Amino acid sequence: MKILLVGEYSRLHNSLKEGLVTLNHDVTIVATNDTFKNYEVDLLIKKKYQIGILKKVKNLIYRFTKTDLESLQIKKQIINLKSQISGFDVVQFINEASFGCTANIEKDIFDLICAWNKNVFLLSCGTDYTSVKYANDNKLRYSILTPYKNGKDKFLSSYGLKFLQPDFVELHHHVYKSIVGVIASDLDYHLPLLNHPKYLGLIPNPINTEKLELQKLNIEDKIVIFHGINSHNYYKKGNDIFEAALEIVNKTYSEKIKVITVRSLPYNEYVKSYNEAHIMLDQIYAYDQGLNALEAMAKGKVVFTGAEKEWLEYYNLEEDTIAINALPDSEAIAKKLEWLILNPEKIIEISSNARKFVETHHHYVSCAKQYLNTWQKHV
């Protein structure tokens, strides 16, 4: 089968491609490389107005004309790639707005790719209209909008609130009219899509465990805690709460722990930067794990991330056996860290369980088979 994967977040489409290629399918990814993360892409869509004078010119022109030079430049690149992104059996968009363009240009790009190919599917694996509206309507105990609603954050663009604006709502409905169906990558997107007529179900995030070697943890000296920060998403990921929890723990256990903090690293540097860690602080306002947490779990790290009761029930698990649920409460997180510091054997146990869980439920080839089954069932 010839498959076109449009867009890339958190290396999801790369891992899926690796699984599909292992199963002898022909796969092409067309995408930007997700800013500083610099993911691999077959057909790279370049953004040239991101820094310096060009960014200033772009912003100035947009302010006075509402014309976005970056979006127009991306659309031009897509048109120039027509011969290379036409004639695929299946197309999957990673988002309703896969290229970060204005809504009208995203619509144009979507229509072009649909016209050149067959059987278009959509992923819900990042902020989109359905998930943001669900959070905004307060249907969750807490959500990625919690910091915004509490007045903490100035980086409003990181919350996906644009998806509630009329032009993006129109884009959402336009996309859903054309797609065969939509697939969720984890429970954070599964819950908002339940009972939607075009919802095809949850397929867990694919993880290439062959590229992520299990690092058997050996605790002889200090327990190493890793905290990776994406500066743009600082509050959205709950980094402020993690830092407050680390301050609490450091007051009592500074001689027992070593904390490593990094900021906004490219993907390849980032995955190397936590190799020596025993514990990773990933994100707070989530109910399930994203790619970052799962890759760390595959390497045997004890990850503080989304591991809510809905996730425990879905996979029939017990609390604190696979991952640690990171509540939006610095004292609660500090207590969990203290529990691990005082019981290092639990770190070893959870590390082993985490790797097995990823191999069982997120293996990139078995996930690729689930995608193939879903696509073939509905084409």
Image (tube, grey):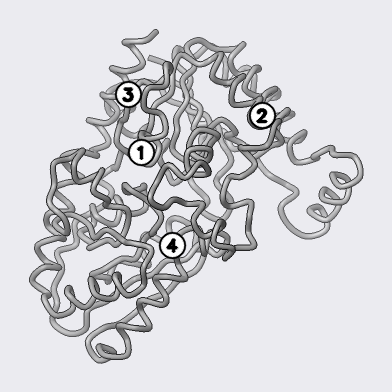
Other-residue count near label 2 (Cα within 10 Å), few / some / many at <14 / 14–19 / ≥20: many
Q: Is residue 40 visible?
A: no
What is the residue that sits farthest to the right in this orientation?
64
Mark 3 residue element: helix
Label 2 sits on residue: 106
Q: Quadrant of residue 13?
A: top left
Closer-to-camera residue (134/178)? 134
Task: Between label 1 and label 2, give the one nearer the viewer.
Answer: 2
Q: CA distance from mark 1 to mark 3?
A: 12 Å
Mark 1 residue element: helix
Label 4 sits on residue: 269
Q: CA distance from mark 4 to mark 1?
A: 18 Å
- Residue type at tag 2: Glu
Task: Between label 4 and label 2, give the one nearer the viewer.
Answer: 2
Label 1 sits on residue: 15
Placement of the C terminus among the 4 image quadrants: top left
- Residue type at tag 3: Tyr
Task: Between label 3 and label 4, give the one nearer the viewer.
Answer: 3
Q: At x 59% / y 26%, what residue is drawn?
A: 172
Task: Between label 1 and label 3, give the one nearer the viewer.
Answer: 3
What is the residue that sits farthest to the top in this orientation?
379
Q: Earlier in the sequence, mark 1 or mark 3?
A: 1
Q: Earlier in the sequence, mark 1 or mark 2?
A: 1
